[in-house]
Amino acid sequence: MDTERTSWAMRILVFVLFLYLLAPVLLVFPMSFSGDQVLRFPPTSWSTRWYSALLENRGMMRAFWTSLALAVIVTALSLVIAIPAAWTMTRLRFRGRDFLFNLFTAPLLLPTIVLGLAILIVFASMGLLATMQGLVIAHLVVTLPYALRVLAVSLSTQNLQCEEAARSLGARPLVVFFRVTLPMMMPGIVAATALCFLVSFDEVVITLFLTGPRISTLPVELYNYVYNRADPLVAAASVLLILLTLGVIMIVERTLGLGRAFVR
């Protein structure tokens, strides 16, 4: 009986904590359908005018497509670099392996504003400010450690007997990698893809240092918009971003399941 009471009490506590954490997100939905000129809760009237205003805002839409293209490119490059790097770090034994792994994942330990300032100083002398190339490289600095760590964990938890069996049957190293290792890495690859895409699409601090009048991303555009105005258009944009995030999570869930993708 004590165990059941504790269990129900813990469930209620967890539910209250989740409700407390999700309350700001849940309030965004009714505020996005407000017909008022300023952000307020509860709204005094209801309308979808701010969704239409968002779609008609050329600056926002241009920034959205820039963010989407940037996230896709950065995610693809992160996987192309992280997959062989993770395999090298987990399958080969060489001097300095731990040092290289810690070096590649070091950006996870640095404050984002410090990292952004350092990238700004370096890119200013290279002419990469306010360019797509500069944004791709800067976002790679942030997303690559996530991809490398997730894929390294995925590889370290694999059953090596499958690869050894393939090699003992005469399969070449590349055949073993593409026919055995890579399919076994698929949950980690899907998790790394979703994580890199969301991190790149949502990155704002580092991007603030690198954008300008020529190029801007959606998080930066929203930041500048909120700085000058306070209307429900931001709430409408937030709702669409929340739905995009939920869409990515649902794709992962439908493909592999969140348990397989993120918990190994």
Image (tube, helix red, strand yellow):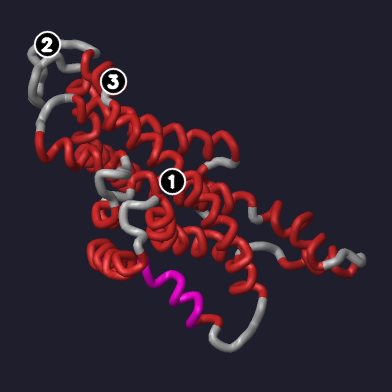
Marks 2/3: CA–CA distance: 21 Å
Q: Badge 3 is on which residue? A: 56
Q: Main secondary structure of the magenta part?
A: helix
Residue 176 relative to residue 243: left or right: right
- Pinpoint residue 199: horizontal percent, then vertical percent: 39, 50
- Pinpoint residue 91: horizontal percent, then vertical percent: 66, 73
Looking at the rendering, in which quadrant would you find the C terminus? bottom right
Of the image marks 2 and 3, the number of the one nearer the N terminus: 2
Please say whether residue 1 is visible from this viewpoint.
no
SS of the residue at dot 1? helix
- What amino acid type is highlighted by mark number 2? Ser
Looking at the rendering, in which quadrant would you find the N terminus? top left
Dot in front, 1 or 2: 1
Q: Which of the two residues, 139 or 17, is positioned nearer the viewer here?
A: 139
**Residue visible at 17% across and 36% down?**
225
Q: Badge 2 is on which residue? A: 45
- What amino acid type is highlighted by mark number 1? Leu
Residue 231 relative to residue 13: left or right: left
**Residue visible at 56% across and 56% down?**
79
SS of the residue at dot 2? loop
Of the image marks 3 and 1, the number of the one nearer the N terminus: 3
Q: Quadrant of residue 247?
A: top left
Task: Tell me the number on the disc at residue 70.
Answer: 1
- What amino acid type is highlighted by mark number 3? Glu
Image: magenta residue range:
99-111
Q: Which of the two residues, 243 or 260, is positioned nearer the viewer here?
A: 243
Marks 1/2: CA–CA distance: 37 Å
Marks 3/1: CA–CA distance: 22 Å
Please say whether residue 129 is visible from this viewpoint.
yes
Q: Does the magenta portion include 83?
A: no
